[in-house]
Amino acid sequence: MDGRIDTAAITTPPRLALDADALLAYVSRHVPAVRRAGRRKVRSLIVSQFGHGQSNPTYKVTCADASGAPVPNLTFVLRKKPPGKILRSAHAVEREHAVQSALGALRRNGTGGGDVPVPTMLALCEDPSVVGTPFYLMSFVPGHVFTKPGLDALPSPAHRRAVYDAMADTLGALHRIDPRRIGLGSFGSGVKSLSSGRGSSPGSGPGSGGASWSERQLERWARQYSLSLVGDADPEPVVTALIEWLRANRPIAEPGGKLVHGDFRLDNIVFESPVGPGPAGTGKHKDKDKPAPGRGVLAVLDWELSTLGAPYGDVAYCCMPYHLPPAAASGGAPAAYPAFAGSIPPSGVPTEAEFVHRWCVASGLPNPRTRTERVAGDPRGAKKPVRSSY
């Protein structure tokens, strides 16, 4: 693979089957476009499963007519909680639906949300009897996802730079939004529709006993790691050492109360073109080696870990490829996040300092200049602390 995924061509037969008849009955009642088409036109569903982004199983669902042929413009995406016992507050499809609904409304109102595009939310079902666990439905976004941070398959350094600029601009736009303005002032802080009525958990809300966001995040992940241990298994010494290092080196001061994604990275962004921002190769932009103007971001996906907190965690997570060993580029540890294939980023990919500066301009926030956020951004994949500054 060259590190580019066409969202229309990445599904396989379901590995975890759904009850298609029950789902058809549900969408016929709750999805307006299907309801308008009617059961005489929509007779069955074609269900396949995406292989990318499977923390919450994700399916492509296409309505079919009596002959089994797809009905035009009636394809959507279903994202559900996995079956079985899961950690408290994990796999929060309700959270994903809430934040994307708010961002979508902001975009439709023409008040600045267009800079953070998301799929259109169609329905949220908290009844596990339909497909086994709660789920939500959203529009299918045809486009392209880049899975390798080096972007080696793109035709020029200018294309690579345009992709990273778009990523920094989109993240900055997210962090510029006032959560209270879009109805998310208490997002993740114990509102029943966002936390299944169980109350807040460390790291999930804008305030918790005076602790900073980084401190709450760290304690939440430390607790999740402890709960994930099987039987009498002892924690790995390297993980214990990492947790203690983070506790001793967490940021003293950080901005809070911002809407953060929690898993913002290149392969959670859908671009319009397989060569990056802009409709390259079409219309007036016929030179495929010259990126067209515009950011070309169609959607930001995978909002499962979104919350209110410090935006520096999102920035640090984006910067992990600058610090991971090249082995991570080919599936070596840490496999949770790919690295650049070589010791330095390919031509056109901005330096870490350039990327962070672009984000600062887009967000209106000061440069982090900290040692800690990068490993705090995702302790799941960290092997050792990284000391550096932007």
Image (spheres, grey):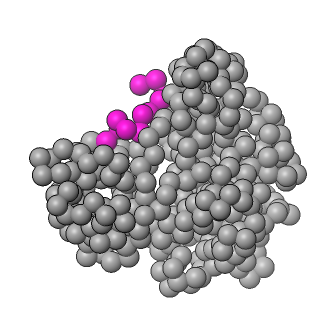
Residue 247 vertical position relative to residue 343 in the rendered view, above or below = below
Residue displayed at 80% across by 39% down: 358
Residue sitting nearer the eye, 336 or 192? 192
Number of residue marks: 0
**Residue 387 locus on image (x, y percent):** 78, 43
Placement of the N terminus among the 4 image quadrants = top left
**Residue 73 locus on image (x, y percent):** 35, 48
Residue sitting nearer the eye, 377 or 348? 348
Residue 128 shown left or right of residue 188 in the figure: left
**Residue 249 locus on image (x, y percent):** 79, 58
The answer to whether residue 341 is visible is no
Residue 236 vertical position relative to residue 389 in the rendered view, above or below = below
Residue 295 vertical position relative to residue 374 in the rendered view, above or below = above
Q: Residue furthest left?
A: 67
**Residue 152 locus on image (x, y percent):** 56, 21
Q: In this picture, which residue range is highlighted in magenta?
A: 1-11
Residue displayed at 81% across by 35% down: 353
Residue displayed at 63% across by 79% down: 189
Residue sitting nearer the eye, 219 or 288? 288
Residue 214 vertical position relative to residue 154 in the rendered view, above or below = below
Q: Quadrant of residue 275?
A: top right
The answer to whether residue 13 is visible is yes
Residue 248 shown left or right of residue 265 in the figure: right
Residue displayed at 15% across by 47% down: 68
Q: Quadrant of residue 289?
A: top right
Residue 236 shown left or right of residue 364 in the figure: left
Q: Is residue 8 magenta?
A: yes
Placement of the C terminus among the 4 image quadrants = top right
Q: Is residue 87 magenta?
A: no
Residue sitting nearer the eye, 256 or 226? 256
Q: Quadrant of residue 252?
A: bottom right
